[in-house]
Amino acid sequence: MKRRQLLWGLSAATLLSACSSPQITDYAAEKPLLDLRQYFNGTLDAYGVFTDRSGKVVKRFTVVMQCSWQGDEGVLDEAFSYSDGTKQRRVWRLTRTGEGHYTGRADDVVGVATGQASGYAFHWNYTLALPVDGRVIEVQFDDWMYLMNERVMLNKASMSKFGVGLGEVTLSFMKRPT
């Protein structure tokens, strides 16, 4: 009986650990090293899609980003163009608060975004006030970025409300040569 309980406990622990989400520290030893102040400096182009919870592409978009840093303070000025012809602008104000740690603010971000970089990855969380059908809803973003090389970064963000998945945003960033 005790042996059966022990096996059940080990099986449950293994199953639970398989369901856990990645941690930013999982990427600490990976290269190339991501320095947000270096990568998000200059002009970048991004290409993305928003997919609903079934995986269907709902919107395609492009972004032109003008990025600059003064010490530990950065500005990411994003100009979005959506496939339906609409335009949007978001200006992020980032602050490096410690080694690999950042906070961010934007007009449509509720409160403060918090994030951490480690190895080639950056992970941050924030709540976005999103206009939908003439009203504004607050949705949570779980946002991961992965530096592929000095010019290319991939981004995958999960969007949820009350813990229920709404969809995902997938982006590729391309830094323009200087």
Image (cartoon, helix red, strand yellow):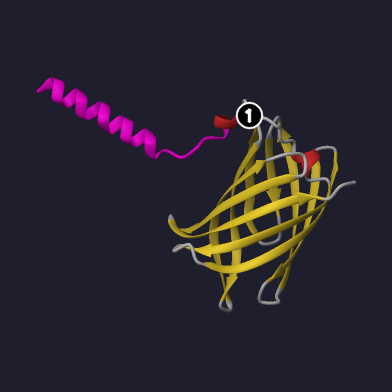
Q: Amino acid at mark 1?
A: Glu
Q: Quadrant of the N terminus?
A: top left
Relative to residue 121, is residue 78 drawn left or right? right
Q: Residue furthest top?
A: 3
User: Relative to residue 88, is residue 168 depicted above or below?
Assistant: above
Q: Which residue bears the numbered disc 1?
A: 30
Per the image, label 1 sits on a secondary structure element best described as: loop
Where residue 167 sits in the image (x, y, percent)? 50, 60
Q: Nearer the viewer, residue 102 or 110?
A: 102
Question: How far across and down, in percent of the image, does residue 150 sit?
Answer: 77, 39
Q: Residue at x 67, y 35 (%)?
A: 101
Query: How many numbered markers are drawn?
Result: 1
Closest to the observer, 175 or 140: 175
Image position of 2 (left or right of 163): left
Q: Is residue 159 above or below residue 130?
A: above
Query: Is residue 102 a member of the stretch shown in magenta?
Result: no
* Residue situated in front as seen by the camera: 145 or 162: 145
Which residues lie in the magenta part? 1-24
Residue drawn at the location 63% of the way across and 49% of the way down:
155
13 in magenta: yes
Q: Residue at x 43, y 55 (%)?
A: 163
Nearest the camera: 152 or 129?
152
Query: Which class describes the residues within 10 Å of circle 1: few (<14), some (14-19), or many (20+)?
Result: few
Asked which quadrant contains residue 147, the reply is top right
